[in-house]
Image (tube, rainbow, N blue to C red):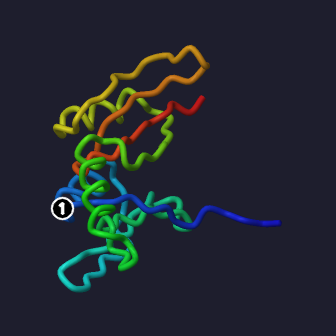
């Protein structure tokens, strides 16, 4: 089989704040910005990886989600326990410095983990955990 990861979804609760983080701080290009019914779906990704994207989507936009489930999702996003993504860079220290200077919520400064990975962690404006590993 020849299967690739085309897109992954992360929730956002403020489209402009999400753009500020993913476009302005991480440097991702905006590929699509689609609005419907007061909601926005924003597709971003690294310029040199046109086949891999992150879709920043309104949480619980699916009509099958109940009001109780929407409340739970909102609570989990506020705590930072709803969604996460793992990114990688050859310049972890430079990336971290850019995020810290941009007022990203720092969860963990760059550190060598006991399982052999050096990484850091921040939260995006919606509370999603963004871990960034150092490529070696």
Q: Nearer the viewer, residue 99 or 74?
A: 74
Decide if residue 25 is in sight here: no
Where does the image place residue 61, in percent across and percent down from the top left?
Answer: 32, 73
Query: Given the current orientation, which residue lies at the most extreme right position?
Result: 1
Where does the image place residue 86, in percent across and percent down from the top left?
Answer: 48, 43
Where does the image place residue 90, in percent across and percent down from the top left?
Answer: 50, 35
Above/below status of 93 relative to 13: above
Q: Quadrant of the C terminus?
A: top right
Identified at 30% across, 76% down, the residue is 33
Q: Quadrant of the N terminus?
A: bottom right
Above/below status of 76 relative to 5: above
Identified at 30% across, 47% down, the residue is 76
Where does the image place residue 28, in percent across and percent down from the top left?
Answer: 37, 57
Decide if residue 28 is in sight here: yes
Q: Nearer the viewer, residue 51 or 18?
A: 18
Horizontal arrangement in the rendering, residue 98 relative to residue 47 (left or right): left
Identified at 33% across, 70% down, the residue is 66
Horizontal arrangement in the rendering, residue 19 relative to residue 28 (left or right): left
Horizontal arrangement in the rendering, residue 47 relative to residue 107 (left or right): right
Q: How many marks?
A: 1
Instruction: Estimate how packed mark 1 is, as few (under 14), some (14 to 19) or many (20 or more) residues with alpha carbons within 10 Å.
Output: some
Identified at 25% across, 49% down, the residue is 75
Judging from the image, what secondary structure is the residue with disc 1 in? loop
Above/below status of 66 relative to 85: below
Q: Nearer the viewer, residue 132 or 125?
A: 125
The residue beneath circle 1 is: 14
């Amino acid at each position: 089989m020849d299967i690739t990861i085309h897109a992954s979804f992360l929730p956002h609760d403020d489209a402009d704040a999400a753009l500020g983080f993913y476009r302005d701080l991480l440097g991702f290009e905006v590929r699509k910005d689609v609005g419907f019914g007061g909601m926005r779906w924003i597709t971003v990704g690294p310029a040199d990886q046109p086949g891999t994207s992150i879709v920043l989507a309104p949480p619980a936009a699916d009509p099958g989600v109940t009001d109780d489930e929407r409340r739970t999702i909102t609570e989990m996003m506020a705590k930072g326990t709803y969604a996460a993504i793992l990114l990688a860079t050859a310049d972890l220290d430079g990336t971290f410095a850019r995020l810290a200077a941009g007022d990203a919520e720092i969860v963990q400064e760059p550190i060598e983990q006991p399982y052999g990975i050096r990484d850091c962690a921040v939260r995006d404006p919606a509370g999603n955990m963004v871990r960034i590993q150092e490529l070696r």
